[in-house]
Image (cartoon, rainbow, N blue to C red):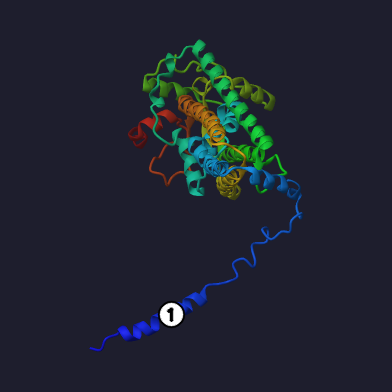
Amino acid sequence: MPSLRGPIAIVAPALLVETVHAVPTTHFDQFFPFWNEPEGATLSSLISPVISCIFETLPEHRKAELGASAVILGLLPTILQSLGSTPPETALLSVRRPLLATLLALGSPSVTAMKTSNLMDSFKDLVEKGDTRPTTISAFRWNYVTKRWRVALSAAEYVAAIVSAANVVYLAYQLGSHAIVIFAPETIFMLPLWTFICIIIHFGGVLILHLKLHVDHKESRNSIRQLIHSEQHDSHRYPLLQNEEPKSGVLCRISTTFRDDVIPAAFQRRKRLRWRKETILVNFLIWVLSMGTLANLVFGSVIFSSLLFFSVRDVLLIVGRYFISALFCRGIVRLELAGFKECTFFEQDERSEDQQTHVDSTEPIPLKDVYQHPQREARL
């Protein structure tokens, strides 16, 4: 068999020459449109020379510190969304304590990015089961909490929520006033805008839950007494059983809502939850909310990674302040959702025939029992 070394030795240099000629030579001829903007075309041209002058005087180790700070700040929205509450959780808490839910949404700015199907499942699990994940708080004996400790608990929650919200607002002011966003150096509203968008997304979850859910403030006392007797609960666990039913009227309902807002959810008046008829508007709003959570994450990452003139120690302090606020708010939400199951009942309707659990629409099911005893739910 003849050797191929000769032809390969001839063809290889030719292929190498052709490869070299195939490399494009127009890399620096044209860029993307916004990079090709002439100097002075935007308002930032008044500030760009100052930024360039600062960069020229900075030593190299400070420039490296700026790069490390940008990496940490760019990851901050992702870190916060793993700690913060989801829009369905905030929306469900607003059924009982709307003012506290607003403060918690402000104190934990980044919103968890969720798919449309995950949002729908989260709304369903929260309403029908009272939670989305296992928790040891559900086993807590709320009847051991006296009235004095209830007041102390509510006051502690509000103090923590107000401090967390004030911390986030002040951070937004500091970052907007004392930092430079590289792609919009003339603005001071980028960080406050991101914080405001987070609150709007939480309010979107509240609107969706209001359109999907019917809250009945009137209780069927016979069914409740039968349920309590069958479960052998004492009267201390349901201290509001003897209270009168809330009066009708918009003003009375508003006053009752704000009066109940200072009471922990576990000790409030009982309410029944039922699904409303499914509409195209609700499904569209859920899709918009899902896209909004993703856009909020991208927008926050772009803004934080574009901030200039921070040391690593400053960045760690900023991240720590955001982290503490989100952690406190998350703890309050988990505690309130655990108490939410103690006095809230979900009722199936005739449109749920495709589910495995078939329940008469007139029989209330306490969320805590559905969550803790799935076998009992199947027997019902």
Q: Note whether residue 98 is visible.
A: no
Q: Residue furthest left?
A: 1
Measured as percent of width and height from the top left, residue 311 is found at 57, 36
Task: Report whether 363 appears left or right of 59.
Answer: left
| Residue 28 at x, y percent in the picture | 62, 66
Name the residue tied to disc 1.
15
Tag count: 1
Check the image and report above or below for 283 versus 134: below
- Quadrant (top left, top right, bottom left, bottom right) of the N terminus: bottom left
Q: Residue furthest bottom?
A: 2
Against 21, residue 7 (above or below) is below
Residue 164 versus residue 183: which sits nearer the camera? 183
Q: Could you say where residue 49 lies in the image, as x and y percent from the top left?
A: 72, 48
Check the picture and name the quadrant holding the C terminus.
top left
Quarter where residue 59 is shown: top right
Q: Is residue 358 visible?
A: yes
Q: Of residues 11 and 265, which is closer to you in this image?
A: 11
Question: Residue 228 sits in which quadrant?
Answer: top left
Q: Residue at x 68, y 48 (%)?
A: 52
Residue 127 image position (x, y, % from top left): 49, 36
Q: Nearer the viewer, residue 223 or 352?
A: 352
The three-letter code of the residue at mark 1 reads Leu
Callout 1 crowding tier (Cα within 10 Å): few <14, some 14–19, many ≥20: few
Dot 1: element:
helix
Q: Nearer the viewer, residue 357 or 199?
A: 199
